[in-house]
Amino acid sequence: MASFVDRVTLHASAGSGGDGCSSVHREKFKPLGGPDGGTGGRGGDIILVVDQGTTTLLDFHHSPHRKATNGKLGYGDWCNGAEGKDLILSVPNGTVVKDLAGNVLADLVGEGTRFIAAQGGKGGLGNAALASSKRRAPGFALKGEPGEERTLNLELKSVADIGLIGFPSAGKSSLIAAISAAKPKIADYPFTTLAPNLGVVQAGSTRFTVADVPGLIPGASEGKGLGLEFLRHVERCAALVHVLDCGTLETDRDPVKDFDIIEEELSHYGGLSERPRIIALNKVDLPDGKAMADMVQPIFEERGYDVYQISAASHIGLTEINYAMARIIQEQRKAEAAEVKTRIVLRPVAVNDSGFTVTANEDGTFTVLGEKPVRWVRQTDFGNAEAIGYLADRLASLGVEKELFKKGAVAGSEVQIGEGDNAVIFDWEPTIEAGAELLAGPRGTDVRVESPWAGRYIEDPVDQLSDDEIALQWENNISNPRDPQVEDSK
């Protein structure tokens, strides 16, 4: 059974917002006291938080689907709905969050660092919040927005100052156990570590962390062995320590050859060529190991490397190599402190940005995309004619209707707002214009939808009226449509 997982896929579904309430306040002697519908509650977020007590992504491996709670409905008497509870997910220090395209969304380093993986939907406004001087008694409320649904890839890159690299059974686990309090698996037979181990080392006044990386083998950069899977754990290291086995029993191996093979694999992986190197010639407590170390040490020194003869078993040379690693860490920390912090550049939206786009498709249909139109459609209750009229007013005020005219839309053109499964498709009627709140009609209705001309595009309504229709309008106290003043107003 897996006990260490450093790469998982997370399916995060935030909570949806609660619907607003459409209600009328009633009390004694005031049967119609005005709108008092409350706003729906906000849906819960899904938040990733760095927790030092979490060292693996195993929980997400077993339960990749996570969902936050929804917000509650609004109520009458100006009562807002309860908010959904945020879902807090603990992740290890050094977790990198990527989207499906491989773009890095967040690099979570440091205790308590937070990232909103999926944002909860906003609650719908109640009719009390929708009331205005022109719309005194709205007979509708807005629906809550759906929560965000995202599929994310989580990768763990261990946060360590020093990375120990080398062949399997070179002594990396023994070294980290000797210089720190870590307790990795150690045996006297050849095997490779299956997961990175972290240890904390104290050298004088400097404290730093050391990670041993599972053994590399020739061809790791091509997918062989485990080395390529775990090389990401040394990407954050300030320096790399080559642990070379000077007491190997394999006749076709020697420390110089092992070093060249490991460096070749690192070059194929990329991004590690500038890291300082330290050479640790291990197992010098063995007679053959000491002789081999004395023979190869001048070769590495000629290449410009710092070389130390050590023995993880008998603790020979560990103090010297610990202080050598501490010096590199001190220099790296001083350089980081002297670096000028990167300024955050704010890029405001251009003043001429309408916030939406209208696209004329080849099949004669039109697609409207934009944050506001898509959000407004999601908030609309299409079972309420007054709510539909309110949506039409909002779209017209935003300029969607004018843009459709410019793109060549005519009466009956198929218009789609949004994309995917949540898109809304309807036959566009340009007679629906802004100003629904100024038209008289029963609560919960929209006279533009109820009128006999709704759904028809009339180039010149006056010329198409019959004498009987004009007489009927006179009987209903409607102005003469053929009045010269009416003609001039056109």
Image: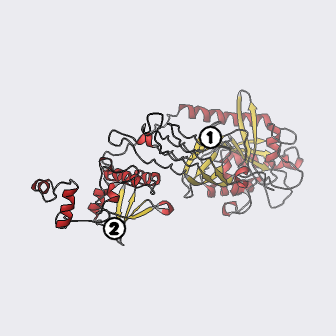
State which quarter of the image contains the C terminus. bottom left
**Front residue (pair 451, 419):** 451
Could you tell which of marks 1 and 2 lies nearer the N-terminus? Answer: 1
Q: How many marks?
A: 2
Other residues around mark 1 within 10 Å, as few (<14) / some (14–19) / many (≥20): some
Instruction: Give how far across and how far down residue 156 sits, in percent.
Output: 67, 49
Instruction: Give how far across and how far down residue 419 sits, in percent.
Output: 46, 61
Residue 238 location, quadrant: top right
Residue at x-position 74% and y-position 27%:
204
Instruction: Give how far across and how far down residue 333 sits, in percent.
Output: 61, 33
Other residues around mark 2 within 10 Å, as few (<14) / some (14–19) / many (≥20): some
Disc 2 secondary structure class: loop
- Amino acid on which the number 1 mark rests in the picture: Val
Instruction: Give how far across and how far down residue 177 sits, in percent.
Output: 82, 41
- Regarding residue 167, the answer to whether it shows in the image is yes
The residue tagged 2 is 413
**Front residue (pair 99, 191):** 99
Q: What whole-number distance in Å separates the C-alpha atoms at marks 1 and 2?
A: 52 Å
Circles 1, 2 touching at the beta carbon (< 8 Å): no
Disc 1 secondary structure class: loop
Judged by depth in the image, the label closer to the viewer, 1 or 2, is: 2
Q: Is residue 445 above or below residue 348?
A: below
The residue tagged 1 is 109
Colour setting: secondary structure
Residue at x-position 21% and y-position 58%:
473
- Amino acid on which the number 2 mark rests in the picture: Ser
State which quarter of the image contains the N terminus. bottom right
**Front residue (pair 328, 419):** 419
